[in-house]
Image (tube, rainbow, N blue to C red):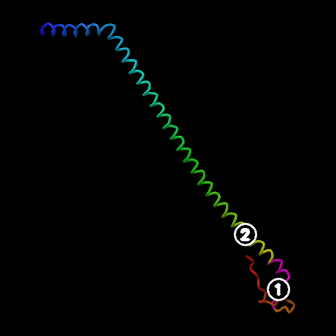
């Protein structure tokens, strides 16, 4: 009886394999392929999204670098502007002082060194430095 059961199992396995190669096998293959194709498409979508995010991050990093360089350059220009302004103000004060001295000197200039009318007497005029 065991031998008969063994033969039936072998026959059943062979028969199911043969049938499996037909319509049922095609159906199973289609289902498996469909799931695999779906997984591949999802994987491609995820990969594509990851590439897009990486490109976005790269562009953002590049923009941040450009912004940082622009800010640094602007700060440098501001420092140069401040220094230029300080120098110009110093030169303006120097010119004002020189003009004041010349105007003041108009009243104290005499080519005759021993001139008794010179005010103040030679060697006593002192310029006051303003600034």
How far across and down, in percent of the image, does residue 9 sit? 19, 10
- 3 or 60, nearer to the observer: 3
> Residue farthest to the right?
117
Where are the magenta residues, as a range?
101-113
- Say which residue appears at 67% left-offset and 62% top-offset: 82
How far across and down, in percent of the image, does residue 2 sit? 12, 10
Residue 109: in magenta span? yes
Q: How many badges with numbers are in the image?
A: 2
Q: Which residue is mark 2?
A: 91
Disc 1 to disc 2, how far (Cα)? 30 Å
- Using a 10 Å C-alpha cutoff, classify the residue at mark 1 as few (fewer than 14 neighbours), some (14 to 19) or many (20 or more): few
Q: Is residue 53 above or below residue 34?
A: below
- Using a 10 Å C-alpha cutoff, classify the residue at mark 2 as few (fewer than 14 neighbours), some (14 to 19) or many (20 or more): few
Q: Which residue is mark 1?
A: 111
User: Quadrant of the image for the C terminus?
Assistant: bottom right
Q: Secondary structure at mark 2?
A: helix
Q: Is residue 78 above or below residue 44?
A: below
- 29 or 3, nearer to the observer: 3
- 14 or 126, nearer to the observer: 14
How far across and down, in percent of the image, does residue 6 sit? 15, 10
Q: Is residue 68 above or below residue 28?
A: below
- Say which residue appears at 68% left-offset and 63% top-offset: 84
N-term-proximal mark, 1 vs 2 = 2
> Residue farthest to the front?
1
Q: Is residue 23 above or below residue 40?
A: above
């Amino acid at each position: 009886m065991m031998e008969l059961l063994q033969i039936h199992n072998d026959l059943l396995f062979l028969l199911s394999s043969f049938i499996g190669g037909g319509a049922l096998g095609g159906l199973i293959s289609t289902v498996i392929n469909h799931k695999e194709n779906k997984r591949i498409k999802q994987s491609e979508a995820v990969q594509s999204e990851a590439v897009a995010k990486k490109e976005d991050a790269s562009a953002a990093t590049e923009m941040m670098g450009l912004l940082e360089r622009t800010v640094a350059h602007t700060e440098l220009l501001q420092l140069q502007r401040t220094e230029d302004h300080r120098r110009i103000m110093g030169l303006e004060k120097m010119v004002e002082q020189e003009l004041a001295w010349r105007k003041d000197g108009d009243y104290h200039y005499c080519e005759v060194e021993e001139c008794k009318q010179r005010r103040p007497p030679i060697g006593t005029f002192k310029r006051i430095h303003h600034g």
